[in-house]
Amino acid sequence: MELFVAVLGSLFSIVDPLGVVPVYLALTHDQSRAQRNRIALVTVFYFAIILLGFFWAGTYILHFFGISLDAMRIAGGVIILGSGLTLLRGGGAPRRKTENSPMVEEADQGHDITFSPLAMPLLAGPGAISLLIGMSTTQKGWENHLIISGVILVLGLLTYVTLRMAPLLFKALGRSGITAITKIMGFITMAVGIQFMITALTNVMAALVR
């Protein structure tokens, strides 16, 4: 249970589905409610498949490229720290900038936005992927792997509910409310990234003094 809660908290802060709400609304501004619901469902399906794929293949990815776990932790920590800093400073992507972006133009032209940019990189970004690749090596055994897989599925469900309720959430919280929550998520994300790097650097220093 402790592992489930810890991983869910870390992943939720990094993925930050609430912070994606303004972008999601901008990309689907001309869609009907039924179309938005379909986009949310397909997006979350891709999102879960991407995270599950990188998690279960994480150990093989590290071995294939000859990357040590501590190197992955340091690189992942830097990415997660940067993601958190971006959220803390900017509070997510402002809608006024998003509305005129190439992403919105593609959506208006009928391009599929479920896989890219919604599922990846907006939700399943490099921070979440690097965290799961690291966990695939440190969390040994089928039981832990199944628990973390369950976390990904629960996170997918929470993300789906968030996207389904995006118009209501945006109306209730407003841009300032979503920005405030996103900044809190950014602070937690930065702490996760720093902890990642501390663990790796501690292992490296211990190996050097032996």
Image: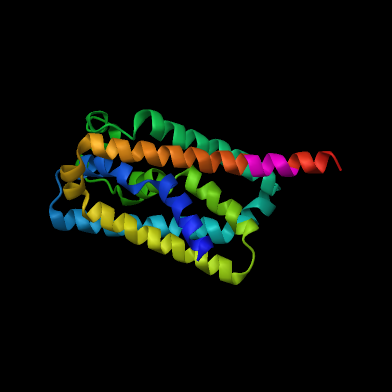
Q: Is residue 178 visible?
A: yes
* 159 vs 109, nearest the viewer: 159
Quarter of the image where the C terminus is located: top right
Horizontal relation, residue 209 to residue 131: left or right: right
Horizontal relation, residue 50 to residue 101: left or right: right
Residue 77 vertical placement versus 152 (above, below):
above
Horizontal relation, residue 131 to residue 39: left or right: right
Residue drawn at x 57%, y 66% is 144
> Residue 50's x, y, as percent?
45, 55
Residue 97 vertical placement versus 5 (above, below):
above
> Residue 11's x, y, as percent?
46, 51
> Residue 92's x, y, as percent?
34, 35
Question: Residue farthest to the front?
Answer: 2
Please tell me whether the stretch drawn in magenta is mainly helix, strand or loop. helix
* 198 vs 70, nearest the viewer: 198
- Quarter-of-image position of residue 111: top left
Residue drawn at x 35%, y 29% is 90
- What stretch of residues is rendered in magenta? 198-203
